[in-house]
Image (cartoon, rainbow, N blue to C red):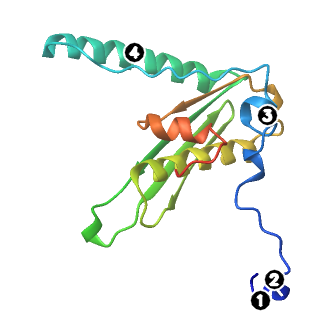
Amino acid sequence: MWANKKLVSIDTIPFNKFSAPGHHLLDKFLDRTISYDIVLISSKNAKEQAKSREAHLLSLNKAFDHSSNSDTCAALVSDASVPLLNTGHQAIAAWSTWHPGHYTEDRRSNGLATSDNTETAAIAGAFNTLADMIDSISNIKEIHVFSDSTNAIKHSLDASLHSA
């Protein structure tokens, strides 16, 4: 038994309550779907890669225009910058949130963190900003997250226990 147990008056839970069954994002919004439209550019030669990149860029621009200009959509854009360890600088998470009539961008220092952790912090910041900027999220049918980190996107929507 722990000798100083009487001195502890705060009950702590080692995980977030959202990790419990019934509290996951998908449990709360059963009628909504989460899909990952992640396209990897894989071609055999440089000409095909350039053509694939151009088509992908057009697709991203179309998705962004749709999500940032529709009353039932929102666009979240995130990015992270992680310096080399020996520079003494901190990681930076930056994001912008787009919904018709609203635009906000913000950033925060993330200390010494991995790229995925910093990008996840940027996505979380964008979701929090969206929740703060609008009156009701119930009118939003689609949220498009634009990020260069597939791991961060998946982690930000996964409420189960994980390290990132």
In terms of secondary structure, where does tag 2 sit? loop
Between 68 and 30, which is closer to the camera in this rendering?
Answer: 30
In terms of secondary structure, where does tag 1 sit? loop
Rendered view: 134 above or below 7: above
Residue 8, numbered label? 2
Q: Is the residue under label 2 in contact with that under label 1 (CB below 8 Å)?
A: yes
Q: Is the residue under label 3 in contact with that under label 1 (CB below 8 Å)?
A: no
Rendered view: 37 above or below 84: above
- Which residue is at 83% across, 39% downward? 135
Between 82 and 129, which is closer to the camera in this rendering?
Answer: 82
Tell me which amino acid carries mark 2: Val
Earlier along the polypeptide chain: callout 2 or callout 3? 2
Tell me which amino acid carries mark 4: Leu
In terms of secondary structure, where does tag 3 sit? helix
Between 111 and 10, which is closer to the camera in this rendering?
Answer: 10
Earlier along the polypeptide chain: callout 4 or callout 1? 1
Q: Which residue position holds label 3?
A: 137
Q: Is residue 86 left or right of residue 14?
A: left
Earlier along the polypeptide chain: callout 4 or callout 3? 4
Residue 58, numbered label? 4
Q: CA distance from mark 2 to mark 4?
A: 58 Å
* Discs 1/2, front: 1
Q: Residues within 10 Å of mark 2 (few under 14, many from 20)?
A: few
* Discs 1/3, front: 1
Q: Position of residue 133 (x, y in %)?
A: 73, 44
Which image quadrant is residue 89 in?
A: bottom left
Q: Position of residue 121 (x, y in %)?
A: 54, 52
